[in-house]
Image: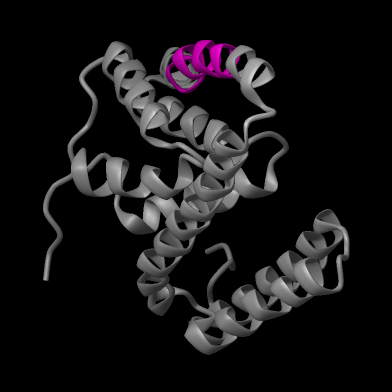
Amino acid sequence: MTSPALARPTSPSELFIAFTWLALQGFGGVLAVAQRELCERRRWLTREQFIEILSIGQVLPGPNICNVALMVGDRFFGWRGAFAALAGMMTVPLVLVLAATILYAEFAAYPAVSGALRGMGAVSAGLIAGTGLKLAGSLRLSPLGVPLCATLAGLAFVAVALLRWPLVWVLAVLGALAWTLAWWRLRARDPHAGKQA
């Protein structure tokens, strides 16, 4: 079964507009919307490509979605695309956040405002969980396999959420372990991988 051909943005301006639209949809977190927008709606990336870019973006310093925007922009138009995508992610949301900050400072004491913010937090958590479940299907292509990926995810959850270990150390240890296991399994599939002719 072949997948449909991927599209590509026609200009850095299209990247700017797409990432501005993406940022404006992402109340509480853009990652929950990014996969749908970039893979399903615009078809600029496959799910596997999106997961690869997101994986790199998560281990680099800075906000994950900004790292994704930089990498997607660079993929199509080099540094001009990277700048356009990042500017799209940041410009309009920055203005909205500044306006919201002014309004929040004025109305923070009202119970309805704090209740609305708690409700938006719950919605954001649901969006992120839904995106995670949607992307979980791509794990079947991972050299680690679904059971081992689920085990590593469970260990990360326990370490960060329950034991409160620093995220950077959990990523370093579990990331190195996952990388090593994946490399080992790929070598086991093809013993000649990595050898130069």
Q: Position of residue 89 (x, y in %)?
A: 47, 23
Which quarter of the figure has residue 18? top left
- Describe residue 34's horizontal placement relative to residue 165 as left or right: left
Q: Residue at x 21, y 38 (%)?
A: 42
Q: Residue at x 42, y 29 (%)?
A: 23
Q: Position of residue 4 (x, y in %)?
A: 11, 53
Q: Nearer the viewer, residue 147 or 121?
A: 121
Q: Nearer the viewer, residue 111 or 195?
A: 111
- Magenta-span inclusion, residue 61: no
Q: Main secondary structure of the magenta part?
A: helix
Q: Nearer the viewer, residue 16 or 30?
A: 30
Which quarter of the figure has residue 148? bottom right
Q: Is residue 111 above or below residue 195?
A: above
Q: Residue at x 48, y 14 (%)?
A: 87
- Describe residue 40's horizontal placement relative to residue 106 as left or right: left
- Here the colouring is one colour
Q: Position of residue 168 (x, y in %)?
A: 82, 54
Q: Nearer the viewer, residue 97 or 184?
A: 97
* Quadrant location, the N terminus: bottom left
- Describe residue 36's horizontal placement relative to residue 31 as left or right: left
Which quarter of the figure has residue 81? top left
Which region shows up in magenta? 87-100
